[in-house]
Amino acid sequence: MSLAGDAAKGRLAIIAGNGLLPAYVAEAARAAGDEPFIISLKGELDRSWQDYDHAVIGVADFAALEGIFCKNDIRRVVMSGGVRRRPEWREIRPSWKTIGKVPSVIRTLLSGGDDTVLQMVIKLIETDGRRVIGAQEIAPDLLASVGPAGVVAPGKDDITDILKAAEAANALGLLDVGQGAVSVGGRVVALEGPEGTDGMLERVASLRTAGRISARRKGVLVKLCKPQQDLRADLPSIGPSTVENARKAGLAGIAVEAGRALVLEREALIAAANASGLFVTGLDRGLPSWGLA
């Protein structure tokens, strides 16, 4: 169904965290004839939304969220962008419809992994027939495709590292901890935690400087969807800053899951990768050895 057809059933809202993704989704929605309402999360605002109808709310202010949904006839919701921290229980502002769920919300915020938290939020949003949709439904051109995106392709040693890091990232995802792993010389040297991909790459760079990682072997970053992940939120993403941080970490390249990862600022990313001699490639989960063998 087209966006215009969906729009007739109610307006689109974009819950916007930090980073580039919310702006891409908003632009794509407008280009398709929709006029999204931007709900920016307090503490995550890193751009002006003055050209759109918008509001700023606390990250756990479900009462304000419900009010915006009702006032603006919101029927479709996209969750996009990063959230640097989880709210404390004191910051939770329930609506009348969610007040009975506050104890379970607090337990999830305190002990659940990111995917568990997102699934909880999706269930709370999808009240009264609303529908949460993925950013890739609005901006499908952001999805990674199979194979190298630039002029550099992974070599034999790189493929060994990709397979090792993919195995680790998949296992990490099953634990609902993170989406990324780095392998150097066939050995996993870093797993993504709460610090995110850029923080993990900074750690790899520090380990390399300290001599804890061989200077002779480059290595690879792999980012995958968690096997159990709800594809409507928090797809793995990379952008030019990922390429720059991979370069600083001394890596040979980056591999992401085709069709289930987002590539932001694609042209700038490819140009940066080509200039640095790094590869950026898409992996096919449906093929043996991710389509590399």
Image (tube, rainbow, N blue to C red):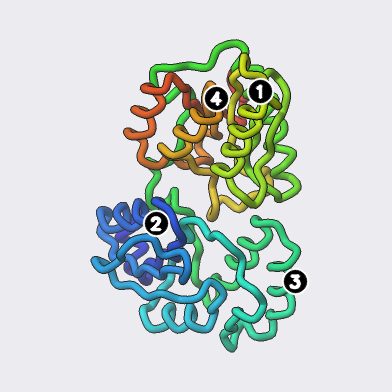
Question: Which residue lies under the disc numbered 1?
Answer: 184
Q: Amino acid at mark 4?
A: Gly
Q: Earlier in the sequence, mark 1 or mark 3?
A: 3
Give the x, y percent position of residue 149: 41, 25
Instruction: Point out the image quarter for the N terminus.
Output: bottom left
Q: Earlier in the sequence, mark 3 or mark 2?
A: 2
Q: How far apart in space, not on screen, are marks 4 and 3 (Cα)?
A: 40 Å
Q: How far apart in space, not on screen, are marks 4 and 2 (Cα)?
A: 30 Å
Instruction: Point out the image quarter for the C terminus.
Output: top right
Name the residue: 34% across, 69% down.
37
Residue density around tag 3, few if under 14, some if 14–19, many if 20 or more, within 10 Å: few
Question: Which residue lies under the disc numbered 2?
Answer: 22
Residue 273 is left or right of residue 208, and the answer is left
Q: Nearer the viewer, mark 4 or mark 3?
A: 4
Q: Secondary structure at mark 2?
A: helix
Residue density around tag 4, few if under 14, some if 14–19, many if 20 or more, within 10 Å: many
Q: Amino acid at mark 3?
A: Arg
Question: Which residue lies under the disc numbered 3?
Answer: 107
Give the x, y percent position of residue 28: 31, 52
Q: Nearer the viewer, mark 4 or mark 2?
A: 4
Q: Are marks 3 and 2 in contact (CB under 8 Å)?
A: no
Residue density around tag 2, few if under 14, some if 14–19, many if 20 or more, within 10 Å: many
* Vertical comparison of 109 with 133: above or below: below
Q: Secondary structure at mark 3?
A: helix
Question: Which residue lies under the disc numbered 4?
Answer: 250
* Vertical comparison of 204 with 59: above or below: above
Q: Secondary structure at mark 1?
A: strand
Name the residue: 75% across, 71% down.
107
Q: How far apart in space, not on screen, are marks 3 and 2 (Cα)?
A: 28 Å
Q: Earlier in the sequence, mark 1 or mark 2?
A: 2
Q: Amino acid at mark 2?
A: Pro
Give the x, y percent position of residue 26: 33, 58
